[in-house]
Image (tube, rainbow, N blue to C red):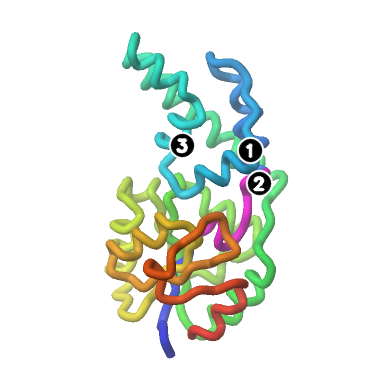
Amino acid sequence: MKFDSLIFDIDGTLWDSTGTIARAWSDASGRFMFGRKHFTKQQVMNEVGRPLDVIFRDLYPEIGELENTDADQAAAVLREINEISTEFEYDYLRRYGAELYPGVADTLKALAAEIPLFIVSNCEKGYIEIMTEASGLTPLFKDWLCFGDTLLEKDRTMQVLIGRHHLQKTAYVGDILNDALSSEKANVPFIWASYGFGEVDPAHYSERIDCFADLMKLV
């Protein structure tokens, strides 16, 4: 057995929620002082895997401009955007769901019968629970941690989970370069899900899967 456990990223690895999130963030934008915006699925896809403060500074460049005149107001507006956009996002995901990649449910069930499965994500608190509940996958994962739990970078969050469960031969499954670099920092082999959102050079991954079911070959 090559790996005795697996840790998963969510977006671009287990499911694609970018369409639902784009709709939610667009609708939430009408609540803010900058006026309504229309965010596309591609814009959200480009931001996936980053902390919310970074994402919304990018999507709302007006925040940076406001900082030049009133830093306190800019910080307050950013907090408001974070909170309300997340409320809309979670509500829309509960109502409309998102699309699991082909083979995810069946493959996870088969894997969970053999090895413990985990999740580590840069998301806020509650997102993992929404994903696992909406998809019916909750019983298949032994544990999970996210940025909202630890307030740490992904590699540090990964290390916390690994230490908690004394994992010895685990690997991280993700789809973007930041996932790969985080795995390197955590000294964890990286499995690149090539069907996801990003491109990763072969120098940065130990294994590559072109569909989710390919994981069965690695355990």
Q: Tag 2, which secondary structure? A: helix
- Image quadrant in which the N terminus is located: bottom left
Q: Which residue is mark 1?
A: 22
Q: Earlier in the sequence, mark 3 or mark 1?
A: 1
Give the magenta range. 10-19
Which residue corresponds to the image point at 38% horizontal and 14% vertical from the top-left? 73
Q: Residue beneath label 2, please?
A: 94
- Which residue is identified by label 3? 55
Callout 1 amino acid: Ala
Q: Residues within 10 Å of mark 2 (few under 14, many from 20)?
A: some
**Is 141 on the left-hand or right-hand side of 165?**
right
Task: Give the image location of residue 2, x and y in percent.
Answer: 41, 86
Instruction: Tell me: 94 left or right of 194.
Output: right
**Residue 170 x, y percent position in the rendering:** 37, 76
Q: Secondary structure under badge 1? A: helix
Q: Is residue 142 visible?
A: no
Q: Earlier in the sequence, mark 2 or mark 3?
A: 3
Marks 2 and 1 sit apart, C-alpha to C-alpha, by 15 Å
Q: State whether residue 1 appears in this view.
A: yes
Q: Quadrant of residue 178?
A: bottom left
From the image, give the main secondary structure of the stretch colored magenta.
loop
Q: CA distance from mark 3 to mark 1?
A: 12 Å
Mark nearer the N terminus (2 vs 1): 1
